Amino acid sequence: MSRVWTRDRRVVTAGGRQAAMATELDGEEETAAAAGKLTGSPQLSVEDDLREMAKNAAWSVSSYKPGNNVLSLRDDNLDTYWQSDGAQPHLVNIQFQKKVKLQLVILYVDFKLDESYTPSKISIRAGDGFHNLKEIKTVELMKPVGWVHISLSGNDPRETFINTFMLQVAILSNHLNGRDTHIRQIKIYGPRPNPVPLQPFHFTSQEFISYSTIR
Amino acid sequence: METLMVDRVQNSLRFFMHRNAIFLCERLCAEFPTEINLQLLATCYLQNGKAYCAYQILKGTSMPHSRYLFAMSCFQMNLLQEAEAALCPANEPNVEVPDGAAGHYLLGLIYRYMGRQALAIEHLMQALTLDPLLWAAYDELCVLGAIEEANDYFSDMAAQRIQQQYLSESSSLNSSNGSEFYNLSSNMAVTSVDSIPRQSKQLGNNTREIASLPLSVMIAKVPASNSGSSNFSQYITPPAATQLSGVAPPPLCRNVHVSFNVANNDVSTKLNNIAVQAPRRKVLDEGKLRKVSGRLFSDSVPRRSTRLSAEAIAVASSNATQVIGNGNGHTSTKFLGGFSSSSSSKVNAASSRSLTFRKGHSWISENFDEGRRSEAFDDSRMENMATTSSSTSMSGDSRYLEQGKAIGDLAQDSRLINGAQELLCLLRTLGEGYRLSCSYRCQEALDVYLKLSEKQFNTGWVLSQVGKIHFELVNYFEADHFFDLARRVSPSILESMDIYSTVLYHMKEEMKLSYLAKELLSVDRLSPQAWCALGNCYSLQKDHETALKNFQRAVQLDSRFVYAHTLCGHEYVELEDFENGIKCYQSALQIDQRHYNSWYGLGVVYLRQEKFKFAEHHLHKAYNINPRSSVLMCYLGMTQHALQRNEDALEMIERAISADKQNPLPVYQKAIILVSLECYDEALNELEQLKESAPHESCVYALMGKIYKRFEMHEKAMLCFGLALDLKPPAADVATIKAAMEKLYLPDEMDDTL
């Protein structure tokens, strides 16, 4: 731990992150993890039994700068970003057509490129609509670069998923006290439905699966 | 000049020099714009895949064969109304369909794709009656579900009919040196090519014409029984002109043609046209036969195949001669049509993609469309028939010519009958097997196929049919085995490979599947099967969007390929885009109403949307088509249970269980239904059985845990839940099971999370 600290000090103050990213991140992660803050990873890693849920959802934002609107959040392009243009908190609203089970929210942010536009405190709220959103998770980020995975599960195994009509990602504050925020991509993950309809449980064995559908 | 041009065009066609052929033919038509020449030009275009050009030039023509060609081009351009109008003009309701069996077959196809099933069936039956060896028509009828008994079609009566047709043609020949020509033709062989011209000279009848082979014999016949050259055009309107696969003829035929050219110069242009067209047909036929023989005897010496195909030429040419000489042209034309239609029409029926594809390929390629294989079998049988009929004659052909022709005739006749009967016997077996597999009576179909001789069995078509049957029986291992064998026997087989990719998908064999997809793509990048295989590969990796793209590509390549549509539907449903999924399934059903996978797909969509009545209706349709599928029965049972009709559901489930003892799903469904009926003990019994047969299935333990919890046997329940979790179900189930475990010692909640 101490080794990491010393590496950290040398690098962080200079702001020149020419050294190996891995070590920096390690250091950052250690500190951040120690403080419970997320830093993001270069890879998007999601379990196989989860899938992206928000393709058919209605996305809206509280404000945006022309040219950096909500579409940039969903275009699978990490170079385009949404930029807000109003007062905090900045909100990204995702409304689904029916109640869905969600497990994971993943954002792509980049402190190195966005600096003071990078979110630092994010609150995730869920509910039936704007009128009854309730906060389910708050996370703090520490100079994140890459994909930030925010799990929506509770500690109880019963609470692996939240079942909701609407999700709201609220940016409460930014790094270096920036007013507006940049987010480059947001993805929402939930469990895959059972490929066989009307079943209480998924099938796991080859014997069951091979007889379970006609293709 | 016309003769010369026609000849050069023929020659170019033969050697695939399409641009040359088209150019010269266009000059020909400009110079001598007769309808016959137009037909030739249309043939050039059709052979080159330019159906639209053929369409343009043949618009408004009225000769039967022109109408046939026109209908063919319309069919390829998907202008089904016009195609129908060409073959069956609305204002002439009783006009004979041109080109007999071929015409009826084409008409059948047109009606099928227009969705007018009854008419399609009627015409296909007619085609089959006119030409009992038209396997392609039989194939279509099976797919349409209209065949009751294969024996009817490939019966001994059919053999009689074939014999009669041959005989009537040969008898008319007898009126003027018929038999000798017949002998000549059947005696043709590589070795005797040179001898024949000499022999024919001896006959001293228009020697220049007879100077070459039997082909030219036909020309000789023309003056002999000439009643007006116009008649001939009618009789000889060669269905061969519609030969769409350009296949390289063996060198033998080239010789024929060369000498033929020499003979031509003295004869009238009209006759030459006729004569020229007929040999082309034979060339193409025999080229196709060569293809067949190449496939059947894959390691045979080319010489043998040329010899065999030479014999086929013999038969073919004998047909031609008979046609010309025959007074009542219709039957023989039909027969003629039948003979080559079995080769040509199936090609026609093949999608146009096969045209473009085939152009570049070697003649030995195995890329058959459905039924072509069978058509190839058809031809191979004809070829063997020719073999049998001429095998003895070959050995002593010179002797034959000198001996009494009557003896030769009789021998020919009996050999003909034998040959026909043999062929029909083979077709009967194949037909029976195919029919049974189309009605999904899989076990019986398997038994029938096993009756085939080993040579026939170890061919791509039969092996892949057997593979398909095993696939329907959900014996994926055997299916894999047979498809693999099929691919080894004919490495570039494409037909049914989409089913093979589905087998591998079910078996979750990623490596094999991606290998298969790559191989298929390297064989033919433009075949829908290859893209279906690739799509299945992506789907297995859960990349449904790419899979969908691939299936859509397959659809683009051949919009009449049913399975691609169905697979698109499946992918849309995986992506939860039910609207588009339904559309895809419906387009699949428009092409083939008996594609039960699409009915099933629709049923599942409605199940997901919880529209249970609709779901039941569609699943029932699927079940009517395939009443032996235990999976379908299981789904029907599930749906009925959802509709609260538990007795029906249980009955259906029982049927599913008895239909396939290996299928664990119905047993599990039965347990679910029993639990909902609160018959917990029986449910437990079923689940105990399942534990034996599928010990690694998490849902079995999960359900057992639920039941024990109901009985308040908490330890057992805990044990079961623990086992269920050990088997690593997905996160959703983990949540449910853990929740159940937590609540184990709490009273059951009102809402049963089952």
Image (tube, rainbow, N blue to C red):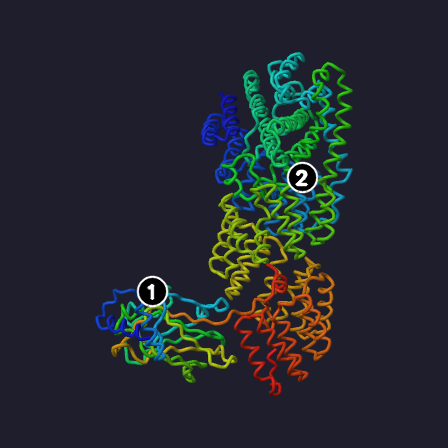
In the image, B238 versus B148, the foreground residue is B148
Measured along the vertical axis of the image, is residue A157 above or below residue A193?
below
Label 1: how many residues lie within 10 Å, few (<14), some (14-19) or many (20+)? Answer: some
Measured along the vertical axis of the image, is residue B628 above or below residue B174?
below
In the image, B356 versus B144, the foreground residue is B356
Name which quarter of the figure residue B672 lies in: bottom right
Chain for disc number 2: B
Residue type for callout 1: Leu
Q: Which residue is mark 1?
A: A78
Q: Which mark is residue B134?
A: 2
- The C terminus of chain B lies in quadrant: bottom right
Label 2: how many residues lie within 10 Å, few (<14), some (14-19) or many (20+)? Answer: many
Q: What is the x, y in percent for residue B260?
A: 57, 20
Judge whether residue B281 can be spotted in this image.
yes
Quick one: SS at disc 2?
loop
Write the residue at 52% across / 40% down: B355
Judge whether residue B231 can be spotted in this image.
no
Q: What is the x, y in percent for residue A106?
A: 40, 71
Residue type for callout 2: Leu
Measured along the vertical axis of the image, is residue B558 above or below residue B270?
below
Measured along the vertical axis of the image, is residue B514 above or below residue A10?
above
Quick one: SS at disc 1?
loop
Q: What is the x, y in percent for residue B376?
A: 63, 37
Write the residue at 48% across / 60% down: B543
Left or right placement of residue A32 versus residue B75 in this view: left
- Report, in whole angstroms, how far the alpha carbon at label 2 lies from the one at label 1: 61 Å
Name the front one of labels 2 and 1. 1
Chain for disc number 1: A
Q: What is the x, y in percent for residue B411?
A: 77, 24
What is the residue that sits farthest to the front in this orientation? A3
Name which quarter of the figure residue B99 lies in: top right
In the image, B561 versus B230, the foreground residue is B561
